[in-house]
Image (tube, rainbow, N blue to C red):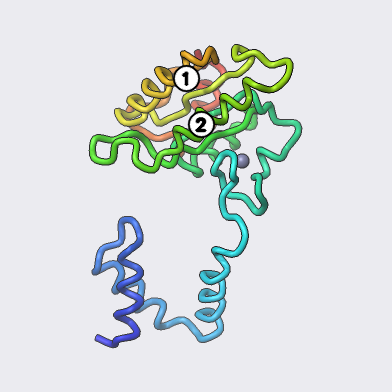
Amino acid sequence: MNSKINKIIEYLTKLQGIGPRQATRLALDLASWNKMDLKDFGDALRDMRNGPIFCRQCFNFAENELCSVCSNPKRDKFKIAVVEKITDINAVEQTGIYDGVYHVLGGAISPSNGQNGLKISELIKRVHMLSNEPGITSDNIEIIAATSPNTYGETTAIYLTEKLKPLGVRVTRLAQGLSAGSSIEYSDEVTLSHALKHRR
Ligand SMILES: [Zn+2]
């Protein structure tokens, strides 16, 4: 094997879900690209760390400090849908009926990883800050546990409820009807709209 290709394979295998065989296939594909595309790809990789990638408040993708949702004054910042992944935001936005903001946890609580890397303390801090805003009482704040309707998502929702209820905020959960074991990301608009409207 060529040492340059080996280097690329080494990096590709660092990606989630990519094994050595897949990495080799991807590296061979890259090797067939023309020089211009490879250069642009290299530039894009290098620029990735210049400037923000994630919203400092909700951890959605962002071009600036705050994402397009958090910086939109029309969105109700006292209504926060807690989702596992950024791609779940897209699914909720597709419904067109949600006017609140989001908080991306970065996954769900799992037996293997526990709460490692999840933005739970950031959420609690955020709720604290909101409840300190003038004229706001904690029951004006709604946290929607919009985690996936599977075991890990449910565990996470229960944990969030236990953590947030003592702060006096309203914690709601998407209504049932989302197919069990699935993910918010793959729920269709009609089902997800229904689950949002009938949350409790
Ligand atoms: Zn944001």
Q: Is residue 21 above or below residue 119?
A: below
Provide the secondary structure element on which disc 1 rests.
Answer: helix
Q: Residue 124: x, y in percent? A: 50, 28
Residue that badge 1 annotates: 164
Mark 1 / mark 2, whichever is N-terminal? 2
Extreme-right residue of the structure: 73
Q: Residue at x 61, y 24 (%)?
A: 79
Task: State the image quarter where residue 176 is shown.
Answer: top left
Callout 2 amino acid: Leu
Q: Going 66% across and 45% down the picture, which residue do you hit?
A: 66
Q: Give, as a three-letter code, the residue at label 1.
A: Leu
Total numbered labels: 2
List x then y, in percent, for residue 185: 46, 38
Q: Quadrant of the N terminus?
A: bottom left
Which picture quadrant has residue 19? bottom left
Kindly state the secondary structure of the residue where label 2 is placed.
helix
Q: Is residue 96 left or right of residue 60?
A: right
Kindly indicate whether the residue at mark 2 contacts the one at mark 1 (C-beta within 8 angstroms).
yes
Near mark 1 (Cα within 10 A), the count class, few <14, some 14-19 or many ≥20, is: some
Could you say where residue 182 lies in the image, as x and y percent from the top left?
Answer: 36, 33
Spatial separation of the CA atoms under disc 1 and disc 2: 9 Å
Nearest the eye: 158 or 37: 158
Q: Report if the beta carbon of the residue with label 1 is closer than 8 angstroms to ligand 1.
A: no
The residue sitting at 75% across, 31% down in the picture is 74
Query: Could you tell me residue 120's position as x and y percent?
Result: 44, 33
Label at residue 123: 2
Out of 143 and 125, give the one closest to the viewer.
Answer: 125
Can you tell me which quadrant of the image ligand 1 is in?
top right
Return the residue nearer the eye: 88 or 110: 110
Query: Does 102 sit left or right of 105 as displayed?
Result: right
